[in-house]
Image: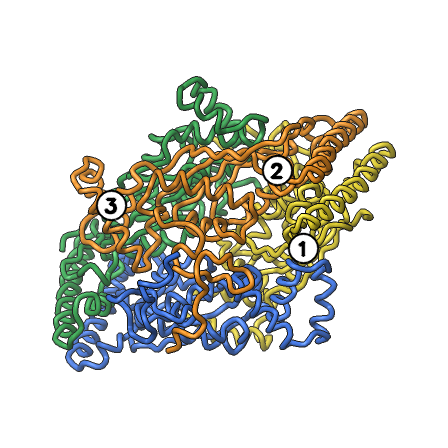
Chain colours: A yellow, B blue, C green, D orange
Amino acid sequence: MPSKECRVELLAHTPEPLSLIYAAFRQCYHAGFAGDMWQRLVAGDIDRQKQADFISQVLESGHASPIEHVSFTFAVEGVSRALTHQLVRHRLASYSQQSQRYVDGSNFEYILPPAIARNQAARARFEAFMAEVGSAYRDLKQILEQDGRKGAKANEDARFVLPQAAESKIVLTMNCRVLLHFFEERCCSRAQWEIRHMADMMLERCRGALPVIFRHAGAKCVRLGYCPEGERFTCGRYPLRDAGRGQP
Amino acid sequence: MPSKECRVELLAHTPEPLSLIYAAFRQCYHAGFAGDMWQRLVAGDIDRQKQADFISQVLESGHASPIEHVSFTFAVEGVSRALTHQLVRHRLASYSQQSQRYVDGSNFEYILPPAIARNQAARARFEAFMAEVGSAYRDLKQILEQDGRKGAKANEDARFVLPQAAESKIVLTMNCRVLLHFFEERCCSRAQWEIRHMADMMLERCRGALPVIFRHAGAKCVRLGYCPEGERFTCGRYPLRDAGRGQP
Amino acid sequence: MPSKECRVELLAHTPEPLSLIYAAFRQCYHAGFAGDMWQRLVAGDIDRQKQADFISQVLESGHASPIEHVSFTFAVEGVSRALTHQLVRHRLASYSQQSQRYVDGSNFEYILPPAIARNQAARARFEAFMAEVGSAYRDLKQILEQDGRKGAKANEDARFVLPQAAESKIVLTMNCRVLLHFFEERCCSRAQWEIRHMADMMLERCRGALPVIFRHAGAKCVRLGYCPEGERFTCGRYPLRDAGRGQP
Amino acid sequence: MPSKECRVELLAHTPEPLSLIYAAFRQCYHAGFAGDMWQRLVAGDIDRQKQADFISQVLESGHASPIEHVSFTFAVEGVSRALTHQLVRHRLASYSQQSQRYVDGSNFEYILPPAIARNQAARARFEAFMAEVGSAYRDLKQILEQDGRKGAKANEDARFVLPQAAESKIVLTMNCRVLLHFFEERCCSRAQWEIRHMADMMLERCRGALPVIFRHAGAKCVRLGYCPEGERFTCGRYPLRDAGRGQP
């Protein structure tokens, strides 16, 4: 039962994302048909920089829904059940997660928090405990099976001893608008370290695939130019919003 | 202002949809990582028929969420505002629709209902009325512009005379699970004729791209093997559910 | 076919909304059980001002999801189909709208845009046109019925002549988090005048029922203290965001 | 650290739920305004049985969206993190869950699965292990605090040892349409025992408050009159769907 590192793989995204977003935006404002424009777009007849500039300008004015047409699908492993429980709270997304009923946990792997890894006493205590979890899981599974509960029926109850640290794997799909929101929340220093690390890795992949949308993505402060978290929670990277300004 | 026919263009769908759904399903039930399996899938190392069979079998057992990872984006023109008002009631989808504020309606096109087209008197009355609409729109727009309201500000109020028949164009994205539900509702003979026609055209495109999911899609009765609409509404294609059976 | 004014009735909201939101917030941060605290809350054992202060403070720090537990249901009449088509684009809500298939449109009412009402020539042209619509609807309905299409089957096609101005009635439910977003978008001077007017009326009802949440609600600028719409679109009520500040 | 039983408290539901659903349904099909009818409904001028019969009949015909206007809010305690991780996968709902960052876990309680409780050896192994978890949590928290990580910062990492069995408390809101779906999935014998038990308790509360909607709610088979789970998974309470029938 070794500890495990987070791995993020970009499995797929909607093809021709720049042109698809451009076509959708144009459909809103112009007399022509996106279905006709599409042929010219995929043939490369419309300058990509021009497309990107148009998108940036309309996004800036607050019209964001057309970026929903493009989705990204990731496979993630090396993350804890503590993380996935937070992750699936983002409701505008699709998830396929490894089941603790159908997949045996006898040799589960786990996530080792960096603050524990850095402290020798903490790390020793944590690793000894993880060995004890494995032993408890296998003992319970054996007793339950002797009791006549096989396979999923035994896993289903034995997994009650598995820790929040237990490693999970998950496939997830979010569209670009949801991703921007996800990064705003989860790339912030107030987010839990593990999901923040995963969000940063996802953002890097998104930036590579579709810079026009993700170049300036990140925690809320990156977009706003100030920190909205208040004096008590701010990390200091950006200035707080001046409380005195903006009265009408 | 001629009448216009419905046109449905499939702009894009998530690439490698069969394998992506297969990988997501497998992630739920197996110890391995979808991110590793993905390389073998796109290299063609896993038989496509085997993938399709696995998907069919798990879907049949009621586990549908992994098909959400695959989305389809359509561009549609030649549909009425009556249709789009119904369409956007499907909330688990993304829409980019041609604006009646930003696009001038002086030469709007319109949808001619088949039952009206077939009746000479109805058709003549309808077409004469549509000419009158155009005239009212242009008159009002001119007055409003003389009054100092330009462009979008004039369109915004002049469009109050545009009919439900007025042609619209829209880009829409739905994932496979939503599409199956959409077809259940809108390919049914109880659906309004226009949206049913559009749904049939969308289904045809989906079937071509991803038969494993859409081969047996359609109105609810196609999946259920009986008509759930009741005696009053059934079209008679499938038998009604026998009210007497199934008591525990 | 007279013109009609917008009317907004608050049919219902979740009971004890202040205490319900307080209990939900507390459940996140405290060891006790909301189910136990609830009895003390409805008995009035916890000061309402203290509840309101706690809610304001946590909301300020960016934690908004607990306000979703409280919903408001409105009945609205005297709004155009142009408005309802925009309204139902807000997907995190529930709608029950008067059907143009099941409700006869022979004596439809309509919405008269203020800019048209103020101009004598525009108003005369608009009202004459509306009379012509009614005539076209009745003629078509009669022909379709003579053709054997009765009731909903005749309405369904005759309504293709009904204008965007045609009056509609709708029941809608939104939770507080969605309402705040709705008001940000629709109380802004960039919103179409009709939906803005309806949003203002809804906001007034919400403020009366739950001031802690809605006291400072409204267009985005009210919350932000500046206008995010950019130089081209700003109405000038709040200053634009200073482009020069906030660089890290 | 004793084990803990599930408790479900109904905190609130939309007031006058029967009449609200009736008014919403009527708004779809009738010329009048729900806002006017509402006064007569709350005054008791319309027979409640007549309202219930109308609702049942329209629901039967497949029109379900008006029941979304009514929501139920529950507070639940005595459920495991294994359960809540499944629960929050239901995305059309609102959740406020006790945080393992802000609430100390030194004296966490836990859920004891019945199959383990019934077997003396399993129970002894399980309970001894839970004591060991508490010890590991407290040790790690102490070390982290000595390392300078206080409060939430220490809890956040110490909780990695907390088990799936760890008790959680959560406030949740679902509308009636979502609840019907939730019960279809979670009152089924294929659902995990713990969430099924909670769903049964929720259903009992819903039935008491709004029998017209929930009288016949439950697992899919209750509505369908047959079991859709297939030969491999059926519990036998209802007959399987006859594979041979229903061919057009």
Q: How far across and down, in percent of the image, does residue B176 sit?
A: 51, 65
Q: Which amino acid is tagged 1?
A: Gly
Whole-percent x and y of residue C8?
27, 42
Q: How far apart are marks 2 and 3 (CA)?
A: 40 Å
Give the numbered dot on residue A226.
2
Q: What residue type is labelled 3?
A: Cys
Q: Is residue B176 left or right of residue A1?
A: left
Give the Cα distance between marks 2 and 1.
53 Å
User: Is residue D165 shown left or right of residue C65?
Assistant: right
Query: Badge 3 is on which residue?
Result: C6
Visible residue check, residue B147: no
Mark 2 chain:
A
Mark linked to residue A151: 1
Q: What element carries label 3?
A: loop
**CA separation, marks 1 and 3?**
62 Å
Q: Residue C108: which disc?
A: none
Q: Nearer the viewer, residue D3 or A95?
A: D3
Label 3 Cα crowd, 10 Å radius (few <14 / some 14-19 / many 20+): some
B94 or A76, which is in the foreground?
A76
Q: Quadrant of residue C214?
A: top left
Give SS at disc 1.
Answer: loop
Residue name at image x 53 percent, y 52 percent = A92
Front-most of residues A82 and A71: A82
Asked if both marks, 1 and 3, belong to the same chain, the answer given is: no
Q: Which amino acid does label 2 sit on?
A: Tyr
Marks 2 and 1 close (CB-CB < 8 Å): no
Residue situated in front as seen by the camera: B88 or A159? A159
- Looking at the figure, which quarter contains the C terminus of chain A? top left
Q: In this view, does C214 lie above or below D66?
A: above
In the figure, residue C73 lies in which quadrant?
top left
Q: SS of the residue at dot 2?
A: loop
The answer to whether one can see residue B5 in this image is yes
